[in-house]
Image (spheres, rainbow, N blue to C red):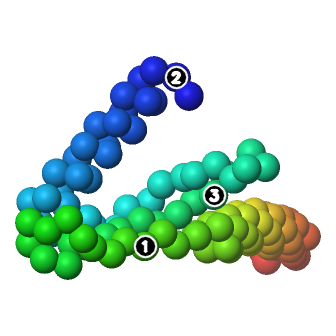
Amino acid sequence: MDGSNAARMARARRTRLAELKANGTVQPYEKEYFHKDGSRVPVLIGGALFQEGGNEGVAFVLDLSEQKRTEAEIRALKDQLYKENLALRDEVDRALCSRKSSAPRSR
């Protein structure tokens, strides 16, 4: 992690803490953690204090790995469908042009 990334993450932590102190909640946000095997784990994090100004609360961290995999698969399928649609459209255009050029001309 480079210095600018570390500084950005420190600012984000301070912002979240200020949000928690001011509002009693931290709106859910996405972040990546690193698994001990080195892989990245996308998560959704949020939290709230039990009482305003208190120092006890609840937080959650949801693993978004499956959702992100599914979204990537959907994007890949959409891209494939788009390419196949373009190829089919080209094929239809060629067939129509071929038909027009081979059609008998009226006099």
Q: Is residue 36 above or below residue 6?
A: below
Q: In this view of the protein, which residue sits in the foreground, 102 or 40? A: 40
* Along the line of sight, the residue nearer the viewer: 83 or 50: 50
Three-letter amino acid code at the position of disc 2: Asp
Residue ID for mark 1: 60
Three-letter amino acid code at the position of disc 1 = Phe
Q: Residue at x 23, y 52 (%)?
A: 17
Q: Is residue 71 left or right of residue 20?
A: right
Vertical comparison of 5 with 32: above or below: above
Where is residue 94 drawn, in percent x and y? 83, 65
Quadrant that contains the N terminus: top right
Task: Say the numbered circle drawn on residue 41.
Answer: 3
Query: In this image, 16 relative to 83: left or right?
Result: left
Picture quadrant where residue 67 is located: bottom right
Q: Which circle marks residue 89 in the picture? A: none
Disc number lying in front (1 or 2): 1
| Side (left or right) of 26 relative to 62 | left
Q: Residue 5: which quarter of the image? A: top left
Crowding at dot 2, Cα within 10 Å, few <14 / some 14-19 / many 20+, comes out as few
**Residue projecting furthest to the right:** 102
Percent x, y for residue 66?
67, 73
Could you tell me which secondary element the residue under label 2 belongs to? loop
Residue at x-position 14% and y-position 68%: 54
> What kind of element bears circle 3?
strand
Q: Which residue matches tag 2?
A: 2
Q: Which quarter of the picture shows residue 24?
A: bottom left
Between 84 and 79, the residue placed more toward the observer is: 79
